Amino acid sequence: MTVPRILVVVIAAAALTAALAPQQAWAPVPPKDCGMITAKGKRYQIKADQLRCTTARRASARYLRYGIKPRGYSCRRYTGTAIKFRCSKGVRVIFAIRR
């Protein structure tokens, strides 16, 4: 074998080894607990995923008190469950649990 052929074989073996190596598993992260707020005399625990707690608390308070959705979010209200609402925008999620 000549030097260029050996080089091609070594590069191909390295690429094959890298392709077959086990990948690191992705572990989901639970939503952050952003604390409690009071709206219309009721207490709610606010949880947020992929956004700051200050933003989540402010948006939740506006939604619970006045029904104003956060800009760009789609929101759904729930009945018959402890979850009061859930708003999402792509991977960003805000929800409130009645306590």
Image (spheres, grey):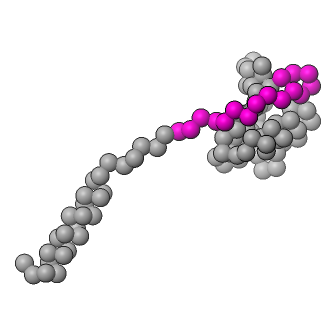
Residue at (82, 45) in percent of width and height: 70
Residue at (73, 19) in percent of width and height: 81
Question: Within the magenta stretch, is there residue 31?
Answer: yes
**Can you say which quadrant of the picture contains the N terminus?**
bottom left
Where residue 6 sits: x, y (%)?
Answer: 14, 75
The answer to whether 40 appears left or right of 20 in the picture is right
The answer to whether 36 appears left or right of 15 in the picture is right
Question: Within the magenta stretch, is there residue 33?
Answer: yes
The answer to whether 2 appears left or right of 32 in the picture is left
Above or below, 67 against 70 in this view is above
Q: Is residue 78 visible?
A: no
Residue at (22, 67) in percent of width and height: 12
Quarter holding residue 18: bottom left
Q: Which residues are magenta?
A: 28-43
Above or below, 14 against 86 in this view is below
Quarter holding residue 96: top right
Q: Nearer the viewer, residue 52 or 80?
A: 52
What secondary structure is the magenta-colored segment mainly? strand
Residue at (49, 40) in percent of width and height: 27
The answer to whether 75 appears left or right of 6 in the picture is right
Where residue 39 sits: x, y (%)?
Answer: 89, 28
Where residue 59 sits: x, y (%)?
Answer: 82, 41
**Can you say which quadrant of the picture contains the C terminus?**
top right
Q: Nearer the viewer, residue 89 or 45?
A: 45
Q: Is residue 65 visible?
A: yes
